[in-house]
Amino acid sequence: MATATRTFTRALRTSARPAFTAAPRIAFRQSGRRFYSSEPAAKQGSSAWLWLAGAAAVGGGGAWFYLNNQGPATPKVFTPKFEDYQAVYNEIASRLEENDEYDDGSYGPVLLRLAWHASGTYDQETGTGGSNGATMRFAPESDHGANAGLKAARDFLEPVKEKFPWITYSDLWILAGVCAIQEMMGPQIPYRPGRTDKDVAACTPDGRLPDAAQAQDHLRNIFYRMGFNDQEIVALAGAHALGRCHTDRSGYSGPWTFSPTVLTNDYYKLLLDEKWQWKKWNGPKQYEDKKTKSLMMLPADMALIQDKKFKEWVQKYAADNDLFFKDFSAVIVKLFELGVPFKEGTEKWVFKPVNA
């Protein structure tokens, strides 16, 4: 049922959005960018990978060593290229909808949430946190309330890590987020590798991620700490067009939009156009749409239309999906790269979508 509904929704969205999905993507593909590869990634064959001590410290895009079973036990250098990362992307994309019973039939939203929460711990003043480290692999960070339910995303990516052991968890989680956005009909998201994995000592303290029960002052405190402005805060919130809340995770319940596996500007439209009322239930305070009572908004969502400066951007994005896609792409890249010490000259790539 979820697959049929999702297919219908995507067909409807595509037919209704000729300017801001299909056309830009086609134009982008035809522009001759060298980032796309038409060749499949080289197979690893029967080579047995042996990571040498300190290899994890090299980071994405560095040189990796392995032993080949078919020849002398001599370490060989493997330097991952664009085609290798595209192969990882393709693997993730091919599995996004493998379990029709998971949520709305796609792991895309939870993978984006993993990438978002891994990155959103960054503190500009101390330079700690962010996507460089993948420290959510460890307690206590994995047990933080804001990260409840993300084990599903981490477990989903384990077979991918096993198939491509050269990629760091840090780069893998962000690549999965990029893949999720593009495969759910979102904008193209430039990506560059170079993140390293850290140990438990680098775990960040609880409280760095947004609290959905709070309002505009809290949002500014959280996002200003990372270096974002009001416009960027509202653009990032557009990710709530995807996925849903769960009572066994955040305590809240329901989706924000009617198409939780397709990224559009509907989140902003619904915020402005629907009449919202407090949901009468035994759970935490949340809003429901008065008309169908099937959608929800959190207090932090409603803060975006209660605050004058935030609302200006909500109105702009509700009126212009192209603008939303442009700004969302820019700000999500900024989020994903916070605190990452990329090597000078590290090139940004755009991966070719598989299903979108």
Image (cartoon, rainbow, N blue to C red):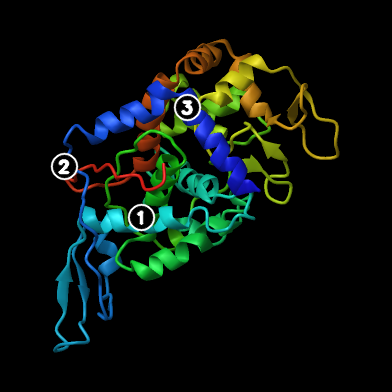
Percent across and percent down for residue 171 are 35, 54
Residue 257: % across, % down? 62, 31
Residue located beneath label 1 in the image: 90
Counting from the top left corner in percent of width and height, residue 90 is at 35, 55
Say which residue appears at 74% left-offset and 47% top-offset: 247
Q: Is residue 149 left or right of residue 68?
A: right
Most extreme residue toward the bottom is: 72
Residue 323 seen from this side: yes
Choose mark 1 or mark 3, whichever is in front: 3
Q: Secondary structure at mark 2?
A: loop
Front residue (pair 267, 118): 267
**Mark 3, mark 2: which one is toward the viewer?**
3
Looking at the image, residue 43 sits to the left or right of residue 124; the answer is: left
**Quadrant in the picture for residue 165:** bottom left
Label 2 crowd bin: few (<14), some (14–19), many (20+), radius 10 Å = few
Q: Label 3: how many residues lie within 10 Å, few (<14), some (14-19) or many (20+)?
A: few
Q: Upstream in the sequence, badge 1 or badge 3?
A: 3
Three-letter residue code for mark 1:
Asn
Residue to which mark 3 is pinned: 15
Q: Label 3, secondary structure: give it.
A: helix
Q: 247 or 128: nearer the eye? A: 247
Which numbered circle lies on residue 34?
2
